[in-house]
Image (cartoon, grey):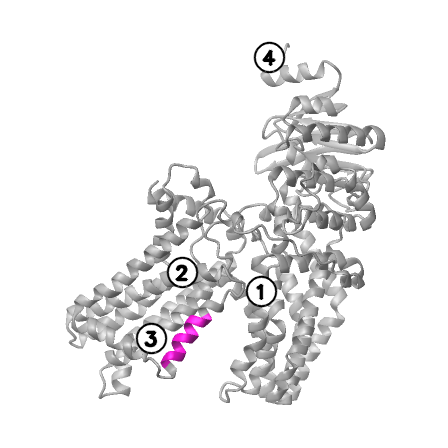
Amino acid sequence: MTINQFLNLEWKQYFRSAYWQKSIAINILMIFLALYFIGMFLIMGIALYPGLKEAYPDQDPLNIVNSYLFYYILIDIILRFFFQKLPVMSVKPLLTLPVKRSHVVHYVLRKSVFSFFNILPLFAFVPFSVMLLLNGYPLVSVLAWFFTLMVLSLIVNFLNFIIESFSAETELSFLPIILLAGGLYALNYFNILSISGLVADALSAIYNNPVFILVPIAVLVVLYMVNHSLLKKKLYLDSSLKTKVETVNASSLEWTKRFGDIAPFLQLDLKLIWRNKRTKSSVWMLALGLLYGLFIYPQDQMSSPAFYAFVGIFVTGIFLINFGQFIPAWDSGYYKLLMSQNIKYEQYLKSKFTLMAMSVIILFVLSIPYVYFGWKILLAHFAAAIYNLGINTHVILYGGSFNRKKIDLSQRAAFNYQGTGAVQWLIGIPLMVLPLAIFGATYFLANFEIACAVLAILGIIGIVLHPKLMTFITKKYLNSKYKMIDAFSQDN
Amino acid sequence: MTHTRELSKTYGSKTVLKINDLLIPKGQSFGLVGNNGAGKTTYFSLLLDLIKPTTGHISSNGITVSESEEWKPFTSAFIDESFLIGYLTPEEYFYFIGELRGQNKADVTALVAQFEDFFHGEILNQKKYLRDLSKGNQKKVGIVAALIGNPEVIILDEPFANLDPTTQIRLKAIIKDLAEKQGVTVLVSSHDLLHVTDVCERIVVLEKGEVIKDLATNDATLKELEAHFSGTEAI
């Protein structure tokens, strides 16, 4: 099987999927974001040399860049972990054909080299290198330096997939990356081991003696081979099955009965969340979300009251955003069943709403200790919680009616690290940016208390209109019923 | 009683189903046969309002399925595995369906208990999620779940495929019993001519989306169907 055939398959898979055709708007947004970043990097690459020369006339700009590369790499690792996923490919049909497994893996890995994350740095480092050459730096050395950076980019690329493959095994999926990045940062910060110095020294060494570029290349080759063997092992149909046939943890969830006719759906949703890896990891995100305020509030310069509401939206709404954005795709696997069963759409949606509303209330209660940083924070969190209850729950339910992407909960697809890609994060933006804008604007125009009141009143309006909004949303879902059934019955 | 009138389904310029008039009386065991692409699953999907008819409509007990949802309480179906919820155990799945259909736990337990030998000891109390069951066992769960809540119309797409011989024979007995003794309308599609002629009192042959044969089953039906599908039919 040649590269051409692989590419051909993927091209068709991508452009023929219901998802692509229905979400052109998101694709356009992604293109604009990409262009934006390319522009930023380009400007940075051109302006960096003259800028540094002007700011630090007595230092070599190249050395300054080298000394900060460690932080660049660290950020690169973290960003890639959250946004870059190994290219998914439906390999099942290929397994019985005369295609070598190792060939498939090579293809997937090589394809990842052309990721946006690897191309973006070029826009900064090519102009920077050109600037170096224009300023009389020796050609061979600059080229060696440039290629080293490219190799470093690829090293991070493949290192990321290894980290992801390990974190996919654990419940706390983001723990390995936090340990790695935090550990490196701490070692450097507390001067136990000056890694930023080491990186700078290594790059100077390569700059002075280009032969040393063989070292990072060797590292890259090793990482590539590790990836290859990891993936090859996963390339069996039963590799996901044999792991473990989980023993059932059955609890009757009797307490949900008090919610009346939505009880069966609530039970179903709770089981959904608790019994599937992917949903379970969004529960762990709650902990991260709750602690988010701790990163912000202790720092004086970042904790202007204008941001309190934003933190509040995030802290009390993390579950809402995480879980809500995939409604109704969570149920895509058995959507036909739900649609032919004796249920009312409204009950189904109401159950999702109740679940999200409960999470907001619980998270608000859990976030009360933030009052330690001042009563204003508590007030802002309270207003944000009401806003979440009244507005964001409805917005996200409404947004769900445009959802056309199936989620395969059973995770049978190889290479599926069940992560959320960049697109999914984008959906969270209107949910958080809009209240931030409203709150920030009223804060600057009037004062803090009024800003809180505005946010809360908006939320209360939403709560008052809840029955009307739900009828409207239900109608929207009913209208796209056939389209959703059709999209959810497609793979990919 | 299910009445199909002027029904057609068109994708682009291709008509995949066109049924002018088809009346299925209450309590009939109705078999649908036809080669791949004949429109069997399309018809069942239309019956369940999973796809939108291009023209015409189906009414079930006087309710137009594409307009009202009132047919749902007395209709149940098992079309494929997408009717199962993978992260539930079989028992939980039965109770969930039961709750949707207004049955309490005891009702469901009693009903499911009748199918002990159909399950062959591989379904109940296994402490396994549905996603971890084999294809055949998943199918058994889906079929039995379709019987919960005393439905008046039961739709089963290819119920015999993937089942072992013992289970096939037991399933035939169950379907016969439903139609003959309990007055349930059972709609079954199959590629196995022997099974449908065994089970169904009426067999409709679809070809390229149109009804080309409508037979009341008798001793000669199997021969006639075999002749039709092997292309040696006497004209």
Between residues A7 and B160, which one lies in front from this camera angle?
B160
Q: Residues within 10 Å of mark 4 (few under 14, many from 20)?
A: few
Amino acid type of the residue that numbered disc 3 sits on in the rendered structure: Phe
Disc 3, SS: helix
User: Do badges 3 and 4 share one subunit?
Assistant: no
Q: Residue placed at 73% from the left, 28% from the top?
A: B172
Quadrant position of the N terminus of chain A in the picture: top left
* Occupied quadrant, residue B59: top right
Q: Which residue is mark 3?
A: A70
Q: Which residue is mark 2?
A: A162
**B24 lies left or right of A202:** right
**Of pointers 3 and 1, the one earlier in the residue sequence:** 3
Q: Are marks 1 and 4 in contact (CB under 8 Å)?
A: no
Q: Are marks 3 and 1 in contact (CB under 8 Å)?
A: no
Q: Residue placed at 82% from the left, 50% from the top?
A: B104
Disc 4, SS: loop
Amino acid type of the residue that numbered disc 2 sits on in the rendered structure: Ile
Inter-mark Cα distance, 3 to 4: 79 Å
The stretch drawn in magenta includes residue A182: yes
Chain of the residue on which disc 4 is drawn: B
* Occupied quadrant, residue B44: top right
Q: Which secondary structure dominates the residues rendered in magenta?
A: helix
User: Do badges 2 and 3 share one subunit?
Assistant: yes
Report the magenta residues as a range.
Answer: A178-188
* Occupied quadrant, residue B5: top right
Q: Which residue is mark 4?
A: B232
Q: Which residue is mark 1?
A: A282
Image coordinates of residue A7 in percent, x first then y, are 38, 46
Disc 1, SS: helix
On the question of residue B64 being in view, the answer is no
